[in-house]
Amino acid sequence: MRYEKKITESTSDKNLIGNFMKTNEELQKDVMEEIKSDPLLSNIASEIGVTAKEGVVTLSGLIDTYNKKLAAERAAQRVMGVKVVAVDLEVRLKGAGSRSDIEISEAVKNALKWHTALNEDLVEIKVDDGWIYLDGVVEWDYQKKAAELAVQDLVGVRGVTNRITIRSTTVDAKEIKNKVAAAFHRSATIDSSNVKVDVSGNKVTIRGKVRSWAEKREAENVAWGFPGIVSVDNQIEVDTEVFSTF
């Protein structure tokens, strides 16, 4: 049986919120409440185990769809003070949710075929024991992400591995750096004074400290939003301490 443990992290070691430190118990409670408040997870919230230690949150247990597994991870990331999310949830399909690999393959093909952002001929599909593998080459990162989003909530899916790559083209590194920095400056979500940009060839590296996963994720999305970029190395740390004196 295929099973993956996923960890998303930053390197900050403190769990300071405002001018006080959240205890492990408080952080655990906040994550549990956030999971419970998610409409997709409310009826199974009690089945998801949550532990917290110095900003590191671990989610564990059995869950009946891959989409709910992703939703649980996103819920934990929304909580202020969370710096690492270790996803130790196993997708175990129940009777009505089980599908053969052939059925899932057909569903994936249809999902990609009817997606306006995608050319289905550019995406290769493999399904093994309910796990979807996506391969191919596309022009933009949003197309790569769209392919994964299109299939992750299909019935019978236990997981998705997205191996689609972005077609490499010649770019002006200085121009891209200036455009990314300008986009950060325009953003209502990102504090551009705390995020730095470097561009080498077709690779963008972003560094700095932000106060939430939402801000970190938005910075990465902005960096991907320019043609020719094939890699974004997001080294941003989620560290609320930098804002604690505001």
Image: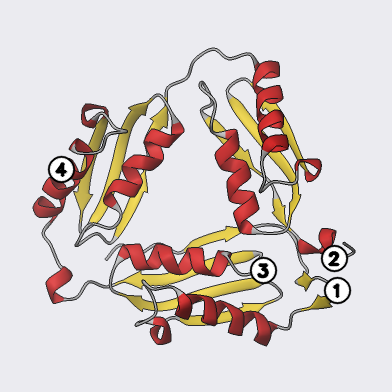
- Residue drawn at point x = 9 percent, y = 51 percent: 102
- Residue position marked by numbered label 3 in the rendering: 80
Q: Is residue 44 above or below residue 74?
A: below
Q: CA distance from mark 2 to mark 3?
A: 12 Å
Residue 87 screen position, x and y as percent = 48, 68
Query: Within the image, what quadrant is residue 167 found in?
Result: top left
Residue 105 as seen in the image, left or right of residue 48:
left
Kindly identify which numbered label has been placed on residue 19.
1
Q: Is residue 200 above or below residue 6?
A: above
Between disc 1 and disc 4, whose residue precedes? 1
Between disc 4 and disc 2, whose residue precedes? 4
Question: Callout 4, which amino acid?
Answer: Asn
Q: CA distance from mark 4 to mark 2?
A: 49 Å
Query: Within the image, what quadrant is residue 180 found in?
Result: top right
CB contact under 8 Å: marks 1 and 2: yes
Question: Callout 2, which amino acid?
Answer: Ser
Q: Quadrant of the C terminus?
A: bottom right
Q: Secondary structure at mark 2?
A: loop
Query: Within the image, what quadrant is residue 211 found in?
Result: bottom right
Residue 169 screen position, x and y as percent = 49, 15
Q: CA distance from mark 1 to mark 4?
A: 51 Å
